[in-house]
Image (cartoon, rainbow, N blue to C red):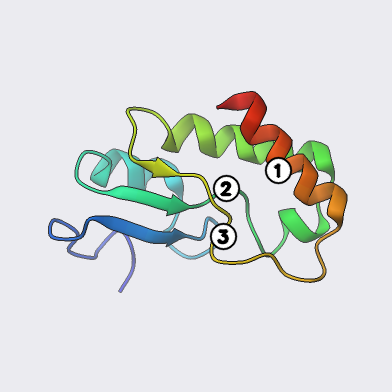
Amino acid sequence: MSAETADFPNAPDLNPIQVSALDMDPAPLKKEYGKDITFWGGAVDPQSILPFGTPNEIKEEVKRNIDILFKDGGYVFANVHNLQANIPIENIVAMLEAVKEFR
């Protein structure tokens, strides 16, 4: 079942949003379900950008996802469920600085 085809009217939240997964692009999800559910996760792509991107790339993606998901409420900023061991500390710091800056 993909996020775009699932039946969400009875669900209070979509947890997590993993922006790199099939059919989990934040913009269409927010447009389709944003009035009905709360989104959790989706801070930054946890498989490619967060572990391998630059701090600037991370800040750009966090800003993009915040601009989409925080609009009109219904969003809990989080990076999926956990942070993997291979993520450089400076990338984690960049993610946290970005949410403070752009929220």
- Considering the image in quadrants, where does the N terminus appear? bottom left
Tag 1: amino acid: Met
Residue at (51%, 65%) from the top-left corner?
21
Dot 3: within a 10 Å radius of its alpha carbon, few (fewer than 14), some, or many (20 or more) residues?
Answer: some
Tag 2: amino acid: Ala
Does dot 1 land on a helix, a strand or a loop? helix
- Considering the image in quadrants, where does the C terminus appear? top right
Does dot 2 land on a helix, a strand or a loop? loop
Identify the mark nearer the N-term, 3 or 1: 3
Q: Are marks 3 and 1 in contact (CB under 8 Å)?
A: no
* As drawn, 7 above or below 63: below
* As drawn, 93 above or below 46: above
61 lies left or right of 55: left
Residue at (29%, 56%) from the top-left corner?
13
Give the spatial CA distance, label 3 vs label 1.
16 Å
Residue at (46%, 51%) from the top-left corner?
25
Residue at (69%, 41%) from the top-left corner?
96
Residue 35: which numbered mark, if any? none
Q: Are marks 3 and 2 in contact (CB under 8 Å)?
A: no
Identify the mark nearer the N-term, 2 or 1: 2
State the residue position of label 1.
95
Give the spatial CA distance, label 2 vs label 1.
8 Å
State the residue position of label 2.
43
Give the spatial CA distance, label 3 vs label 2.
11 Å
Q: Are marks 2 and 1 in contact (CB under 8 Å)?
A: yes
The answer to which image quadrant residue 28 occupies is top left
Tag 3: amino acid: Ser
Dot 1: within a 10 Å radius of its alpha carbon, few (fewer than 14), some, or many (20 or more) residues?
Answer: many
Dot 2: within a 10 Å radius of its alpha carbon, few (fewer than 14), some, or many (20 or more) residues?
Answer: many
Residue 20: which numbered mark, if any? 3
